[in-house]
Image (cartoon, helix red, strand yellow):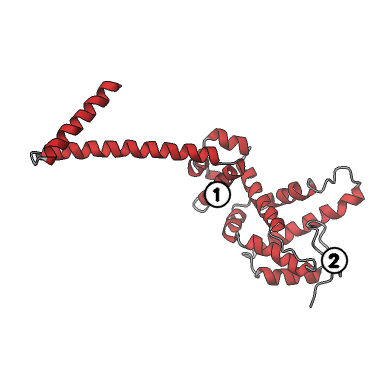
Amino acid sequence: MVLPYVIHNLLFLYLFYKLVYNKATNDAFYFISILLKIKLRRLNCNKRGKLLLMRRKNTTSKMMKGYIIGALLLLMKKRNFSEISIGEITDKAGVNRSTYYRNFHSKEEIIETFFCNILEQTITELPADDNLTLQEYLAHVFKVFYSYKDDILCIHQNKLSHLLLSALNSYFLVSTDTVNESFIERLPLYYHTGGIFNNFILWFDCNMEPAPEIFAEVAAKICLPNARPVLLHPKNFTTNPVRP
């Protein structure tokens, strides 16, 4: 392996010498251009390898999941969900199959995780207001979902919206530790989970119209006075009735 490398460099220096002293022929120009391309390609490959290594060292599991989720959503803009292979997802995300299977067991789980991330965002970005009303709270939730309108409608068109219910169940029913509660104690949470899910499905069916603020106003009026959603219960949400 060393000898070809030495010959390659000697030939490059010889042609470069002829070029500098204006003795290069057309063939010399051609060969030196080829050698330069080879050197640049090797340099780029080395840089790409170093960047990939740095990316892997600095990439968390959450970031990897983000790459995979983003890749699938991009692919779904052009092809049906059922037609997309795992290999296409990993190629698009720039990860290998082992990374994929460390984070997901199926393509459906990717979509469910996408919905879970949105639900988590609704909590982490909730305004720190002790007097937050039901209508204001619902408007916040709907606005977060609306910011992902294109992706959500793409998922809905692929008949995968049912995975939102799985996300609601896994994110809230598990996190609220209802396992040891009785049927009567667990019923309100399941009841509200199903109701909120169906409200979202109706909204998706209508192309996510009306706007989040109007949707929140209508939804709040349907609720009973002093209603407080059992499903989403941040500490700073009050049971005050909706202000007119």
Residue at the spot 77% in from the left edge and 50% down from the top edge: 172
Name the residue: 49% across, 39% down.
54
Quarter-of-image position of residue 4: top left
Left of 199 or right of it: where is 182? Answer: right
- SS assignment at label 2: loop
Identify the residue position indicated by label 1 in the image: 70
Label 2 sits on residue: 239
Q: Are marks 2 and 1 in contact (CB under 8 Å)?
A: no
Instruction: Name the spot of residue 129 as percent of width and height, x first.
Output: 76, 66
Residue at the bottom extreme? 244
- Screen quadrant of the N terminus: top left
Can you say which quadrant of the picture contains the C terminus? bottom right
Q: What residue type is labelled 1?
A: Gly
**Residue 208 rendering spot, x and y as whole percentages:** 63, 65
**Could you say which quadrant of the image residue 40 lies in?**
top left
Q: Say which of 32 and 225 sits in front.
A: 32
The residue at the point 61 percent across, 57 percent down is: 152
For disc 1, the neighbor class at 10 Å (few under 14, some 14 to 19, many from 20) is some
Tag 1's secondary structure? Answer: helix
Looking at the picture, tell me which residue is in the foreground, 203 or 102: 102
Residue 222, quarter of the rendered image: bottom right
Q: Position of residue 232 (x, y in %)?
A: 78, 57
Answer yes or no: is residue 181 visible: yes
* Kind of residue indicated by mark 2: Thr
Using the numbered discs, state the Cα–Cα distance from disc 2 to disc 1 in whole angstroms. Answer: 37 Å
Residue pictured at 68% horizontal, 63% vertical:
142
